[in-house]
Image: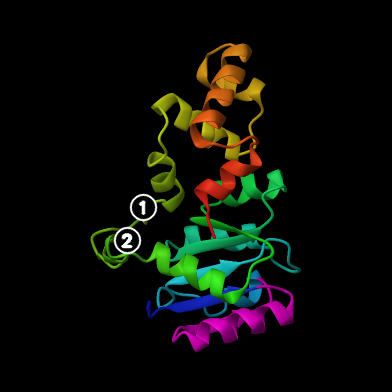
Amino acid sequence: MVQCRVLIVDDEEDTRELLSASLSREGMFTQTAKNGKEALTFIDNSFDVLVTDIVMPEMDGISLLQETTNQELQIVKIVITSFADKENVKAALNAGADYLIEKPFNGSQLKSVIDNLYDSEFYTSRNDPSNRLLSNIFQRRLMSLPITETEKRIVSLIVRGASNETISIALGISHQTVKNRVSLIFRKLGISSRQEIFAILFPV
């Protein structure tokens, strides 16, 4: 069982309490905050994991992520979102989210995600004083996919909300080539839509 300190930030009191209670039963220390502004009053490197919603009053989750980056906090950042909300997904990844968890989910699923993230290799890296920056968990999962390097670049752009046209311009290839590559990626991964890519990269 992973023993760690988790900060849960969500403007819905029921959600905060349910997740906190569930993780506490598993032996984790939990602290809660109703928005990013409150979280910043006590967040520091004593916390191992930040779990935050995006849409909150006073300070949203994206601003909170950006502030943790500005403060160089060595903390795993898990963002609560909907994979269908491309703009928020894009904003979260660009703001430094390490992992996305899709609504709805329960405390047991969140615990499973935290346990999987805190394998021995990652935990050692996180606590190495010489390692000032966390390895990006999203990039690790992306690199493990059974696809070519070019296809990985396409997937990286897809999850950040890029259209086929944008991908075409970014990679310097034709629009039709992008369409063909995306179809090939789908076949290799056994999926049929862009949204399913998120379930592969961020399983619960």
Circle 1/circle 2 CB separation < 8 Å: yes
Q: In this view, does 177 lie above or below 21?
A: above
State the residue at coordinates (45%, 83%): 28
- Closer to the camera, 154 or 75? 154
Q: Label 2, on which residue?
A: 122
Question: Bounds of the magenta span?
Answer: 10-35
- Is 144 on the left-hand or right-hand side of 199? left
Percent from the top left, x then y, of residue 15? Answer: 69, 77
In the rendered image, which quarter contains the N terminus? Answer: bottom left
Query: Disc 1 vs disc 2: which is toward the camera?
Result: 2
Q: Quadrant of residue 35?
A: bottom right
Is 151 placed left or right of 81 in the picture?
Answer: left
Mark positioned earlier in the residue sequence (1 or 2): 2
Which residue sits at x=65%, y=36%? 193
Is residue 74 visible in the rendered image? The answer is no
Mark 1 burial class by Cα count in 10 Å: few <14, some 14-19, many 20+: some
Residue 108 at what x, y percent from top left?
55, 75
Residue drawn at (64%, 70%), measured in percent from left and top?
A: 36
Frontmost residue, 160 versus 199:
199
- 145 horizontally vs 123: left or right: right
- Residue topped by disc 1: 135
Quarter of the C terminus within the rendering: bottom right
Give me the C-alpha separation between circle 1 and circle 2: 8 Å
Where disc 2 sits, the SS reads helix
Q: What residue type is labelled 1?
A: Ser
